[in-house]
Image (tube, rainbow, N blue to C red):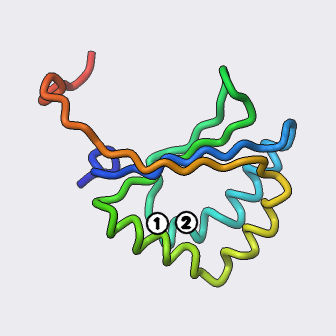
Amino acid sequence: MTATAKALVDHRIYTIQPRRMPEFIEVFDRLAMPILLATLGSPMGFWVSQVGPLNQFVHLWGYDDLADYERRSIARDAHADFPAYLSASGHLIVAQETRLIRRVDMPSLRGFTGG
């Protein structure tokens, strides 16, 4: 299954201290990404908010099912270097939302290639 076809998506939203997004992204990239790539695999992508609630960093990770999510999340949390990331980023994060969302098969999109 490709990342975009994963049945379950971990949709995370971190609200970052105002004017601290560049620092958060640097810490996240340097300390969290090596751990996340090793334990969660390839992300679906990263975004920052432009309109609406500001200072939000959004990332999506795809999973085959709930068991896959739980297994990989446990591996992330147990990684020896994960506490260093949590410590380095804690003062930058105001709030965090984690949503598990399921893919919906839309019959009208079968075979649709865009355009």
Give residue 85's quadrant in the image.
bottom right
Residue identified by numbered label 1:
40
Q: Which mark is residue 67?
A: none
Q: Residue at x 47, y 53 (%)?
A: 43
Q: Residue at x 23, y 55 (%)?
A: 1
Q: Are marks 1 and 2 in contact (CB under 8 Å)?
A: yes
Q: Is residue 60 visible?
A: no
Query: Is 94 displayed left or right of 45 in the figure?
Result: right
Query: Is 93 displayed left or right of 112 in the figure?
Result: right
In the image, is residue 1 above or below residue 20?
below
Callout 1 secondary element: loop
Residue identified by numbered label 2:
36
Q: Residue at x 49, y 48 (%)?
A: 99
In the image, is residue 37 above or below residue 16?
below
Give residue 70's quadrant in the image.
bottom left
Q: Position of residue 94 (x, y in %)?
A: 78, 47
Mark 2 residue crowding within 10 angstroms, few (<14) / some (14–19) / many (20+): many
Callout 2 secondary element: helix
Q: Position of residue 28 (x, y in %)?
A: 70, 57
Q: Residue at x 30, y 51 (%)?
A: 6
User: Three-letter amino acid code at disc 1?
Assistant: Leu
Q: Position of residue 111 (x, y in %)?
A: 12, 29
Q: Position of residue 80 (x, y in %)?
A: 64, 84
Q: How far apart are the alpha carbons under marks 1 and 2?
A: 5 Å
Of all residues, the one furthest to the bottom in this rendering is 80
